[in-house]
Image (spheres, grey):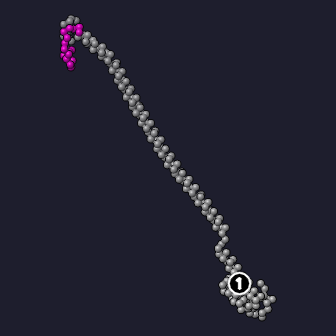
């Protein structure tokens, strides 16, 4: 090809190109520029591809790290939830243990009080014993009045008083027998039995 044809082809290519670059007067300078561009494009394409791959790899790594970070955060959140649940269970168990211990303490105290209560004699029985004792003493004194002091009227009043105050006692029955002996028999002191 001739120089003229090459020049025409280059001019047509320049016009067809979107950005028009000024045509150099020297064809060799233009060819060198184009060759430099092609070398740049030939070098830039693999570099751009490598850069794109690096960007894609970086984005993938970032996404992977983000995913791992989210997974770690989810694990941490689930562990924290489990810890809270364990705390709640532990608190409930401790509360239950305290209630059981308190119930046991109260039961022991109740058992102790029941034992003490069982050891206390029945107050009604104690009163009955005292009533019997008092009635016996009154009958004994009435017997002495009648036998030793020969105070028949005072003894009769004492026997009547025992029967009036303590009608359900054995001493009241004894007092009734003594009264009948006194009223039916003449005063013979030796016949009275205690």
* Residue 40 covered by magenta stretch: no
Residue 170 visible in this rendered orientation of the protein: no
Q: Nearer the viewer, residue 95 or 140?
A: 140
- The segment highlighted magenta reads 13-29
Q: Could you say where residue 158 lies in the image, as x and y percent from the top left?
A: 70, 87
Residue found at the far front of this picture? 149
Tell me which residue sits at (78%, 85%) in the image.
193
**Residue 50 percent across, percent down from the top left:** 36, 21
Q: For label 1, count other residues whose C-alpha is less than 10 Å away and answer few (under 14), some (14-19) or many (20+).
A: many
From the viewer's perspective, is 165 left or right of 146? left
Point out residue 15 in the picture as x, y percentages from the top left corner: 18, 16
Q: Residue at x 32, y 18 (%)?
A: 45
Residue at 65%, 75% (x, y): give it. 124
Residue 73, can we see it? yes
Q: State yes or no: residue 28 in magenta.
A: yes
Q: Is residue 81 above or below residue 193?
A: above
Please name the residue that numbered disc 1 is placed on. Answer: 138
Of residue 96 and residue 172, the one placed in the foreground of this image is 172
The C terminus lies in quadrant: bottom right
Q: Name the residue: 48% across, 46% down.
A: 84
Q: Position of residue 142 (x, y in %)?
A: 73, 86
The local secondary structure at tag 1 comes to helix
Residues 98 and 148: in front is 148
């Amino acid at each position: 090809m001739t120089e003229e044809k090459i020049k025409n082809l280059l001019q047509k290519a320049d016009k067809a190109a979107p950005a028009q670059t000024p045509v150099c007067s020297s064809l060799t300078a233009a060819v060198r520029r184009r060759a430099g561009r092609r070398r740049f494009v030939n070098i830039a394409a693999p570099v751009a591809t490598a850069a794109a791959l690096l960007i894609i790899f970086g984005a993938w790594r970032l996404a992977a790290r983000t995913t791992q970070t989210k997974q770690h955060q989810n694990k941490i959140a689930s562990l924290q939830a489990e810890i809270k649940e364990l705390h709640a269970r532990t608190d409930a168990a401790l509360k239950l243990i305290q209630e059981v211990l308190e119930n046991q303490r109260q039961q022991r105290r109740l058992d102790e009080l029941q034992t003490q209560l069982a050891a206390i004699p029945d107050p009604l029985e104690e009163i009955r014993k005292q009533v019997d004792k008092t009635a016996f003493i009154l009958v004994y004194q009435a017997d002495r009045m009648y036998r030793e002091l020969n105070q028949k009227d005072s003894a009769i009043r004492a026997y009547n008083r025992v029967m009036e105050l303590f009608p359900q006692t054995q001493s009241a029955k004894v007092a009734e027998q003594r009264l009948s002996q006194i009223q039916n028999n003449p005063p013979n002191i030796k016949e009275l039995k205690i």
